[in-house]
Image (spheres, rainbow, N blue to C red):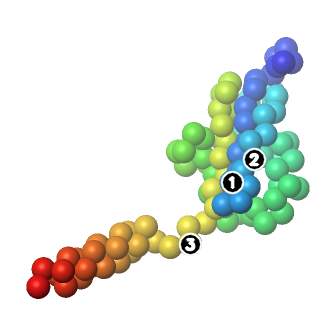
Amino acid sequence: MVEQNKIRVEVAYAKPEEQVIIPIDVDPGTTLDEAIRISGILEHFPEIELSQNRTGIFGKIADPDTVLQERDRVEIYRPLIADPKESRRKRAAKKGAQSASGAD
């Protein structure tokens, strides 16, 4: 139950082997960065570096000083391992090579 004069938000972080969503009640005016720190998620995942990991709300990048609204889901994103555009190019080239060799 949400305390009076508080708003309910969630803080989420996911690794391939583990996903965590922490619901917390915070004061109106709480920022994204404050909610992350209040949630305790940094202690659970010490590899998170807020100076390096991007953050957002419901899949959209948001600044750490963004003021949260009721039911926002704060997300902490892991760095990309590969460039998505480069990965698509490689897949397309591989598929094209397979198609060309099968057309003989």
**Callout 1 crowding tier (Cα within 10 Å): few <14, some 14–19, many ≥20:** some
Q: Residue at x 82, y 50 (%)?
A: 41
Q: Amino acid at mark 3?
A: Ile
**Residue position for label 1:** 14
**Kind of residue sitting beneath label 1:** Ala
Rendered location of residue 13, percent (x, y): 70, 51
Vertical order, 64 against 49 (above or below): above
Specify whether residue 67 is in view.
no
**Side of 101 relative to 86 (left or right):** left
Against 40, residue 104 (above or below) is below
The answer, for residue 99, to whether it is visible in the render is yes
Residue 68's mark?
Answer: none
Question: Does label 2 or label 3 sit earlier along the sequence?
Answer: 2
Q: Residue at x 82, y 28 (%)?
A: 25
Judging from the image, what secondary structure is the residue with disc 2 in? strand
Residue type of the residue flagged with mark 2 = Val
- For residue 20, the mark is 2
Find numbered disc 1 in the image and state the secondary structure of the residue it sits on: strand
Q: Which residue is mark 3?
A: 81
